[in-house]
Image (cartoon, helix red, strand yellow):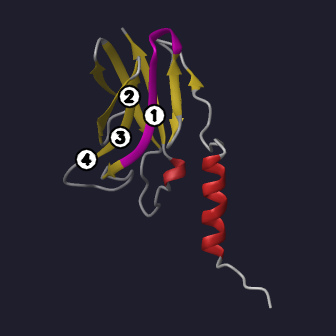
């Protein structure tokens, strides 16, 4: 009689095998340039090679924006966690866009950053993590 491993143990073994052989599930960074808008999905990285700057959209920490078509006491906000790798130095930043705004601006070191998070919430519709997009434009 053959003994079968539970599915979770089998999947764990495959994962460990992939990790020890050096294979990775990560995507290549999206090429980006200063002054040009780019769009990232959760988990995706943009590389501005001329600056040695990588930006990774890690996750949406909070989305309390007032949905379209609903009257709210507060407009709410959306906050995203972004990993920044600048010439090998890695840090994490949190960017926040107020509800109702089309685009927000901030600074990142010597850079000016414009950003917005899509889609905007609609009444009665939940936004899946895979649907979020972080649109960014990095300039001097």
User: Residue 80: x percent and y percent?
Assistant: 35, 41
Quadrant position of residue 30 = top right
Residue at screen point 42% across, 51% down = 121
| Cβ atoms under marks 2 and 1 closer than 8 Å | yes
User: Residue 99: x percent and y percent?
Assistant: 30, 43
Please state the extent of the stretch shown in magenta in the rendering. Answer: 49-60
Residue hosting label 4: 75
Q: CA distance from mark 4 to mark 3?
A: 20 Å
Extreme front residue here?
Answer: 1
Tell which of 90 and 15 is nearer to you: 15
Q: CA distance from mark 3 to mark 1?
A: 9 Å
Residue hosting label 3: 81
Location of the C terminus by quadrant is top left
Q: Earlier in the sequence, mark 4 or mark 3?
A: 4
- Classify mark 2: helix, strand or loop: strand
**Is residue 59 found inside the magenta-colored segment of the image?**
yes
- Classify mark 4: helix, strand or loop: loop
Extreme bottom residue here?
Answer: 1
User: Residue 81: x percent and y percent?
Assistant: 35, 40
Vertical position of residue 77 compared to residue 2: above or below: above
Residue hosting label 2: 84
**Taking 45 as reference, is 73 left or right?**
left
């Amino acid at each position: 009689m053959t003994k079968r491993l539970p599915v979770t143990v089998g999947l764990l073994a495959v994962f460990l095998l992939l990790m020890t052989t050096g294979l990775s599930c990560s995507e290549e960074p999206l090429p980006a340039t200063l002054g040009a808008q780019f769009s990232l999905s959760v988990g995706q990285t943009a590389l501005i090679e001329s600056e040695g700057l990588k930006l990774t959209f890690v996750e949406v920490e909070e989305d309390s924006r007032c949905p379209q078509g609903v009257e709210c006491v507060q407009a709410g906000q959306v906050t995203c966690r972004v990993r920044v790798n600048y010439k090998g130095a890695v840090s994490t930043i949190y960017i926040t866009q107020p509800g109702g705004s089309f685009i927000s601006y901030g600074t990142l070191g010597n850079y000016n950053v414009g950003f917005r998070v899509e889609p905007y919430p609609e009444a009665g519709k939940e936004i899946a993590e895979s649907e979020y997009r972080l649109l960014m434009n990095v300039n001097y």
